[in-house]
């Protein structure tokens, strides 16, 4: 028995080790030619640059759709500056444009402190300046010599900006037509489209997973600022009132009970004191100790690694908070929708740093048919549905023009939702929406009634049948079957193996939703069991 367990742990560790190489590659796949920096090597890499060298520094998050779409552009820029690829007017005797510009990248999920240090508030952010200016011990880190360059999709335009700053005339060869993403002329008709399993309710396990990741983001060094207390507390309060998963609702309530102690109102903490507040908040388990998370997304699983996932889960969370929002007993009238929209829009503003997504969302909130039209719970439910369909429409158009190559999942084209198959009564005979019927459908769909409960790790409860791709290892675990506690030797062996790869593996397994991330959780869960 003991041997079997050691073998099992060793096998898991071996799988984890084997997963590291591809994970490293995946983490840098957004722009493989850029030099990827982490908190541990940042200062050394900057110190190694030449005195006259300039740096382009991109800050991104792997889950951020705008970063995924900007990826191919930044890759062209990085290949141009770092390797001299597609250099239209090369200088004899030089392999890459002079003076040297080096394109680098920082993943803000894995390296939150770096992004906090450079005061990055939206992804992707591209900074440009003499490399030495980026050295963290440099006193003038907010010096004007570091310039923000708009991360648009026009690589030639970005090279022009750098040329202007350096008084240089380097030219990037325009992209050949056959390298550009194809434009569809069939108005979005796609072959081999995966038909979404039409479960009659949102997947609670995906909502729980999105909640855990959202909370990780909210308490990360990159995003939590002393000025963010109000949006932070409002969102936790909304979850405490309306979260569809009981453990997350309880976790949010528990945090609300101690919030004034944990993060006193009107406090003006210095950096050290605020770091302590952030640490206290980040160790709180918003969905309880038993959360093991899905090994794969279910409703939100993409057809390839890295697609869908977090942002899909976030939408489900927002819609379900709208559908379950409550009118406090102190309110005579129903302003639940207004409260929901104020809370969610402030959350997006402060904790959803995908720059494009945030700007578009806040524009919708401030539009004529935005915040001023939302009062009741039904208003909120319908507004969130309309806003999401507005995003779907815009992204469908981008997908058709070939502009969403990084973020779009070709097997899940954007549609106006719900489909007639999912809600036959939501459209009238003339094809227009029947908003009363749609509101009823949305409340039922996002309320969570009748949906299988998420699986719990520690108390042995199991969720029901999944509606997405079956989860890896969704069956009964051997450890639960035997119910025997593991020996100290097994635990020591397991920790020795885990520790051996831990340091090396942490960064590669820190990307939410990645295979490495899931393996880390799986291994951590197994170690807890034995
Ligand atoms: C607030 C916010 C703003 C965003 N803005 C952008 C942006 O500007 N640019 C960009 O590239 N990406 C943006 N995204 C990401 C994008 O909307 C998708 O989440 C991502 O492309 C993954 O799409 P998906 O196929 O998983 O489905 P999603 O659009 O994420 O939908 C998730 C699930 O919600 C349900 N659903 C779909 N439509 C509706 C609806 N109208 N009402 C209720 N439920 C619905 C479906 O079951 C679907 O599977 C944003 C995400 C969020 C949360």
Image: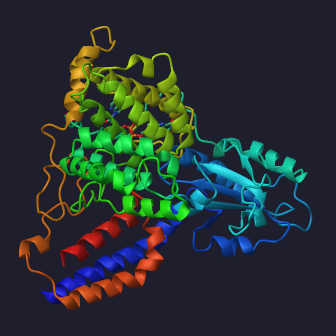
Q: Quadrant of the N terminus?
A: bottom left
Tell me which residue sits at (84%, 52%) in the image: 88
Residue at screen point 22% across, 25% down: 441
Q: Is residue 470 above or below residue 379?
A: below
User: Considering only vertical position in the picture, is 498 above or below 111?
Assistant: below
Q: Is residue 488 above or below residue 188?
A: below
Q: Position of residue 68 (x, y in %)?
A: 54, 48
Report the side of 172 relative to 220 (left or right).
right
Identified at 61% across, 60% down, the residue is: 117
Q: Nearer the viewer, residue 526 or 137?
A: 137
Q: Nearer the viewer, residue 47 or 80?
A: 47
- Can you see residue 83? no
Residue 454 screen position, x and y as percent: 19, 51
Residue 347 as seen in the image, left or right of residue 430: right
Query: Does residue 209 appear left or right of residue 108 in this picture?
Result: left
Relative image position of residue 153 (x, y in whole percent): 66, 42
Q: Quadrant of residue 458?
A: bottom left
């Amino acid at each position: 028995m003991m041997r079997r367990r050691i073998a099992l742990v060793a096998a898991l560790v071996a799988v984890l080790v084997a997963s590291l190489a591809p994970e490293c590659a995946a983490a840098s796949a957004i722009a493989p030619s850029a030099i990827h920096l982490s908190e541990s090597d940042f200062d050394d890499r900057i110190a190694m640059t030449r005195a006259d060298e300039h740096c382009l520094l991109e800050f991104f998050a792997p889950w951020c759709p705008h970063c995924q779409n900007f990826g191919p552009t930044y890759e062209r820029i990085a290949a141009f500056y770092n390797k001299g690829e597609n250099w239209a007017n090369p200088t004899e005797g030089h392999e890459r444009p002079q003076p040297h510009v080096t394109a680098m990248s920082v993943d803000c999920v894995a390296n939150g402190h770096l992004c906090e240090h450079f005061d990055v508030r939206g992804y992707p952010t591209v900074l440009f300046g003499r490399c030495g200016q980026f050295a963290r011990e440099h006193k003038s880190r907010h010096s004007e010599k570091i310039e923000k360059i708009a991360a648009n999709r026009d690589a030639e335009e970005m090279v022009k900006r750098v040329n202007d700053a350096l008084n240089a005339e380097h030219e990037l060869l325009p992209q050949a037509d056959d390298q550009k993403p194809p434009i569809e002329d069939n108005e979005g008709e796609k072959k081999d489209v995966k038909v979404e399993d039409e479960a009659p309710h949102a997947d609670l396990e995906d909502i729980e997973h999105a909640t855990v990741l959202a909370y990780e983001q909210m308490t990360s060094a990159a995003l939590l600022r002393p000025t963010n207390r109000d949006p932070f507390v409002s969102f936790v309060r909304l979850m405490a009132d309306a979260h569809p998963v009981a453990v997350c609702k309880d976790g949010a309530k528990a945090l609300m009970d101690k919030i004034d102690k944990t993060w006193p109102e009107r406090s003006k903490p210095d950096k050290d004191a605020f770091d302590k507040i952030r640490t206290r908040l980040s160790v709180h388990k918003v969905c309880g100790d038993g959360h093991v998370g899905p090994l794969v997304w279910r409703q939100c699983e993409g057809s390839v690694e890295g697609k869908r996932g977090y942002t899909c889960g976030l939408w489900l969370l927002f819609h379900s908070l709208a559908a379950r929002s409550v009118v406090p007993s102190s309110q005579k009238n129903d302003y639940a929708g207004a409260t929901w929209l104020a809370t969610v829009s402030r959350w997006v503003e402060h904790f959803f740093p995908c720059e494009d997504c945030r700007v578009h969302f806040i524009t919708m909130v401030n539009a004529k048919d935005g915040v001023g039209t939302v009062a009741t719970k039904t208003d909120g439910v319908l507004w969130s549905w309309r806003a999401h369909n507005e995003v779907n429409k815009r992204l469908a158009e981008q997908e058709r023009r070939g502009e969403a190559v990084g973020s779009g999942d070709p097997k899940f084209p954007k549609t106006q939702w719900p489909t007639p198959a999912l809600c036959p009564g939501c459209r009238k005979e003339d094809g227009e929406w029947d908003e009363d019927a749609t509101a009823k459908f949305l409340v039922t769909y996002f309320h969570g009634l009748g949906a299988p409960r998420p699986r719990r790790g520690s108390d042995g409860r199991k969720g029901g049948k999944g509606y997405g791709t079956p989860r890896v290892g969704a069956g009964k675990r051997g450890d639960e079957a035997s119910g025997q506690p593991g020996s100290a030797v097994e635990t020591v062996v397991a920790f020795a193996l885990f520790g051996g790869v831990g340091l090396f593996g942490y960064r590669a397994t820190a990307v939410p939703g990645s295979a490495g991330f899931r393996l880390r959780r799986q291994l951590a869960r197994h170690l807890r069991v034995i």
